[in-house]
Amino acid sequence: MPPLAYRGRLAPSPTGLLHLGHARTFWVAAERARAAGGTLVLRNDDLDAQRFRLDFVDAMLEDLRWLGFRWQEGPDTGGPHAPYNQSGRRAHYRAALERLHAAGLIFPCTRSRRDVLDAIGAPHEGAGADDEPVYPREFRPPAGAPLPPLGETITVNWRLRVPEGEELAFTDGRCGEQRATAGRDFGDFLVWRKDDVPSYQLACAVDDAEMAITEVVRGADLIRSTFRQLLVFRALGRPAPRFYHCPLMNDDRGERLAKRHDALSLRSLRARGVTPAEIFAQFAAELA
Ligand code: GLU
């Protein structure tokens, strides 16, 4: 069979202004799609209604256009897999959740994050705050225990039961061979939250599958999430895309760039007269 035509994506979350770190990852994604003569999809990850703001969506589109990125499918351009705003794709995520439920691959969980952190003796703040702690084995209901119905409105957390002890591997296009053991490096993870919002892991895997993405380019902070998403693809019977994780960008003090680094937001660089060509020349030198 001939290889599938390349389909890549940019998937920003409108929770703040885009900064240089985002631009660098998106530049890599756009260059890889261009080099492959492929399609670039813009997906607006506006799932978390508490954290996203409408004005950031407009700012995000404007910044991406200012940089010169062009996408063939997206919230503004439409396309065969519309809608491209995650907030409009709830029915897709719910259908996937129902599938996981029918297959008995998930379980309801009433433990709080605090319960989980206490059980594994982890600090409540600081290290690992970005990532889900490994869910303690003793909190799991027995395998095969009958599942309560999902219900129309979801009021408990639902987690995917990971295959304890299984070693998962994938070859990353940038970082090479990656391995993790389910149950040790990551545990039973959230697929739906008790405030009735799908988790990032579920939504992202469903979209990448349904939008027929062939390569996911994103930051290296998401490598662990990739293992979780590989389990979602498998559970849904969908082939996984290839992955290419870009190194993260640090500030002068060696700290990871975050949306709070306003001085390095694309807005402020632009206001200071920096041009996209200068920005891209810097990226090319950094990633050479
Ligand atoms: N929207 C996610 C973020 O900004 C990116 C998810 C992804 O690329 O998979 O962190």
Image (cartoon, grey):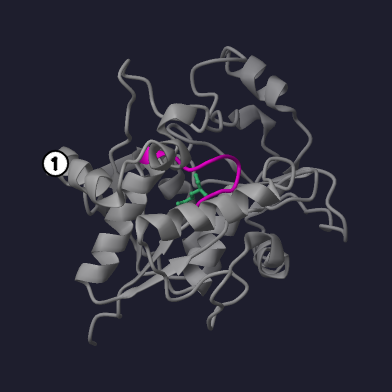
Residue 16 is inside the magenta segment: yes
Q: Please, what secondary structure does the residue beneath circle 1 have?
A: helix
Image coordinates for residue 152, horizontal then vertical, percent: 88, 61
Q: Which residues are magenta?
A: 12-20
Task: Give the residue displayed 48% in from the left and 41% down from the top.
Answer: 164
Whether residue 57 sits left or right of residue 279 in the image: it is right
Q: Nearer the viewer, residue 109 or 210?
A: 210
Task: Report the quarter where the C terminus lies.
Answer: top left
What residue type is disc 1 on? Answer: Ala
Q: Is residue 109 above or below residue 211?
A: above
Task: Locate residue 129: give its quadrant.
Answer: top right
Mark 1, other Cα within 10 Å: few <14 / some 14–19 / many ≥20? few
Q: Nearer the viewer, residue 112 or 87?
A: 87
Task: Give the residue displayed 52% in from the left and 73% down from the top.
Answer: 210
Q: Is residue 130 above or below residue 14?
A: above
Residue under label 1: 285
Task: Give the residue displayed 24% in from the left and 51% down from the top.
Answer: 277
Whether residue 79 sits left or right of residue 274 in the image: it is right
Image coordinates for residue 49, horizontal then vertical, percent: 73, 48
Task: Locate residue 33: give its quadrant.
Answer: bottom left
